[in-house]
Image: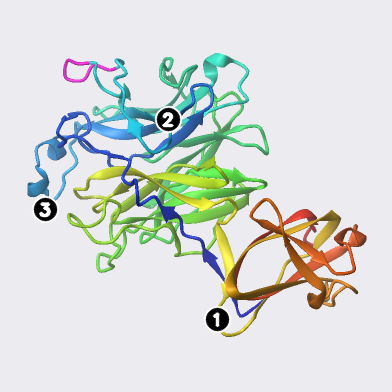
Amino acid sequence: MLDNVTLIVNKVQKDTDNNPLFSEEYFGIHKKKWEVRYDNGYPNVIYDPKYQKYRCYYTSFTYDNDSSNTSLKERINKRYVPSKNRISSLCYAESIDGINWYKPNLNLVNFDGSYENNILMEFVHGTSVFLDEEELDFRKRYKLITKVDYPSGRSYMAVSFSEDGIHFGKLIEWPRYNPQPDTHNFAFKDKKTGKYKVITRIWQDGVRIPAISESIDFINWSEPEEILRGDGFQNQIYSMPVFQCEDIYLGLASIYHEGDRSEPNYDLVDIELKYATNIEHWDSVCKGQYFIPRGEGFYPDGEFDCGCIYAASPIEINNKLYFYYMGGNGPHTDFRETSFARSWIEKDKFAYYETKDKNNEGILYTRPFTILGDDLFILTEIDTLGEISVSLCKENGESYEGYELENSVLIGTDTNYQRICFKKKKVQELKGKSVVILIKFKNARIFSIAGDIETNKIRM
């Protein structure tokens, strides 16, 4: 139950001191001819403790006639036409500190007569790479899933494995099923089930639909099934990397605004935060609020990420979650130049409750919990004139004796959380009791509750 309270997505902080971290270099001083158009990029960012490196695997068009034959100046007054013979490839960059990135010569792919490039493999699109730290076979530490895509029109889903994250084995075609996965085919290992999952895409009536497939061995996959939809043609979900926080799945959905040409965001892409407790059923944290906001302006003079954003699942560094992303400075279907960047939020601060009317208090009742011990914490930000008080209540809203609002005390810890205590009572004295947590606050933001509590099952 809420009173004068609203939920807000906590937008990331962009690393304005260092962004962009790297960009397309087709028109650079030291021209890289294979970096003609990153397009969506679909970044996969990994930290490998064995090699002590951050790694970025990203999709790029390495051959694209219209991009290569149109100068930056000419692009302003010309529409982009995708080349039928364009080639999509998987490229690689690495970093020691996560800020300064290097594109090494891998000597793996012959591009225009030279192996001096950072291409891992050609004719692949929407590739996902992840490090499976639980894998017992060292030859399969790195797992890759991709859409093999030839200009001739033949395409199929495939997987591969690697020990070092650079030298991958022969691509193994899926034995069954072949969706239309022109998206980020995001693979990961589900902590809840121990199975491998891939978030891919299917189509229905011309609408892009995220779908999920699962596997025990990473080779044999189930038929992809729909898990989520956007809002008609106007707000379609183009891709959605996911990650897990405790028992919750979070998704970084790239929302493609395709429907209404009169809208200012037409043909642009925003990142919206999705969540699920069951990976087959998703919902929006705050529909229409964007987690990684696009930059200011429009092509060609806007900020590097003013047009389209496609994110990677986060990396935790020093109690912060870093979200790397590809940001393009133009519309999805037109010319744009794309760069790699990063942003961050403090751990667990994905969204918060605040008061609608700043001059009055807000009241927030949680759903019922069962108390299991003495630890009870709240994650919050309190302004200079802000205040928060907490009560532990019965399910009818009546406070347990000694746990009223006026008896609550918040005590700092060595984390971002504060401990919820009471003047004459210990939380553990309610062990086994069903408790609703009442929070009254003003000039503050409430992110989460944690501790020795268990959510009560919903009565049907």
Q: Position of residue 124 (x, y in %)?
A: 34, 28
Report if the CB atoms under discs 2 and 1 are less than 8 Å apart. Answer: no
State which tag comes first along the sequence, 2 or 1: 2
- Looking at the image, residue 191 lies above or below residue 437: above
Callout in the foreground (3, 2): 2
In the picture, which quadrant includes the N terminus? bottom right
Q: Main secondary structure of the magenta part?
A: loop
Q: Which mark is residue 169?
A: none
How is the model colour-coded?
rainbow
The quadrant in which residue 367 appears is: bottom right
Q: Position of residue 419 (x, y in %)?
A: 75, 59
Q: Is residue 356 above or below residue 118?
A: below
- Magenta-colored span: 109-114
Q: Disc 2 and disc 1: Cα gap in Å?
A: 44 Å
Which residue position holds label 1?
358
Looking at the image, which is closer to me, 404 or 27? 404
- In this rendering, which labeled residue sits more in front, label 2 or label 1? 2
From the top left corner, tell me how far across and down residue 165 is, in percent. 45, 21
Q: Is residue 456 above or below residue 3?
A: above
Q: Is residue 255 visible?
A: yes
Cα–Cα gap, marks 1 and 3: 45 Å
Name the residue carrying label 2. 96
Residue that numbered label 3 is attached to: 76
Q: Who's the residue at 35% across and 33% down the image?
A: 101
Of the residues shown, which amino acid type is indicated by label 3? Ile
Q: Is residue 262 left or right of residue 56?
A: left
Which is nearer the eye, 221 or 186? 186
